[in-house]
Image (cartoon, rainbow, N blue to C red):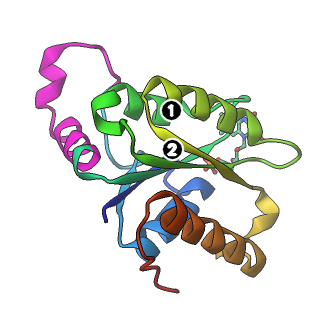
Amino acid sequence: MNIAIISGTPRKNGLTKVVAKQLAHKLKGTLVDTSVLELPLFNGEEEQGRHPSVQWLRRVAEEADAFIWVSPEYHNGMSGALKNVLEFLSSHHFHQKPTLLLAVSGGGKGGVNALNQMRTVGRGLYADVVPEQLIFDPIDFRSGGLSEQKETKLDQLVRDFISNRCQESVSFSSM
Ligand SMILES: Cc1cc2nc3c(=O)[nH]c(=O)nc-3n(C[C@H](O)[C@H](O)[C@H](O)COP(=O)(O)O)c2cc1C
């Protein structure tokens, strides 16, 4: 089973990347890291299809059986970086593929706005977006990683996602 994890933070040290990297490691999945991918801004021109980053992204999405989208909440929405990734893709890449949504916020009641937007966009892409979702606040992070409590919660969510929604047995290594 091939899982692609898309990290929507454009910041090299963004907290979203902490979550996405950890998942990619545990699931032996492919990390689409928007902070290093150097994807051009989608302009609809055919020649962008020859850009190496675009070709790599489309290949990863094509080969993925399931997705986890992790977005920071920026100005009450998903990040532009994540939306740009999705604009290079289409329903062809997502149709009927289980997709789990996670958001990382600055605290307070943030995160849910990004999740709601991602859910709407996921529907536009015909992704099989599951109802379960999770938000990470600054309090959930400890020196370069997640707090034990949040990590346990995330592990359980992902285990359930894979076994219930992807109909696969879980191969989820602990770190
Ligand atoms: C441009 C920008 C806008 C932001 N807007 C929000 C917001 O509307 N709500 C919120 O909870 N946090 C907001 N934040 C804080 C981020 O959600 C926070 O930095 C979090 O760690 C996720 O972003 P990161 O992965 O880039 O670190 C914003 C941060 C930036 C850089």
Q: Position of residue 25 (x, y in %)?
A: 42, 74
Can residue 101 be seen? Answer: yes
Residue 82 left/right relative to 50: right
Quadrant where the N terminus sits is: bottom left
Which residue is under mark 1? 122
Question: Is residue 43 positioned above or below 148 on the image?
Answer: above
Q: CA distance from mark 1 to mark 2?
A: 14 Å
**SS at badge 2:** loop
Residue mark closest to the camera, 1 vs 2: 1
The mark found on residue 8 in the picture is: 2
Residue 50 sits in which quadrant? top left
Amino acid on which disc 1 is placed: Gly
**Any magenta on residue 44?**
yes
Amino acid on which disc 2 is placed: Gly
Would you say the residues marked 1 and 2 are in contact, meaning their CB atoms lie under 8 Å apart?
no
Residue 8 left/right relative to 32: right
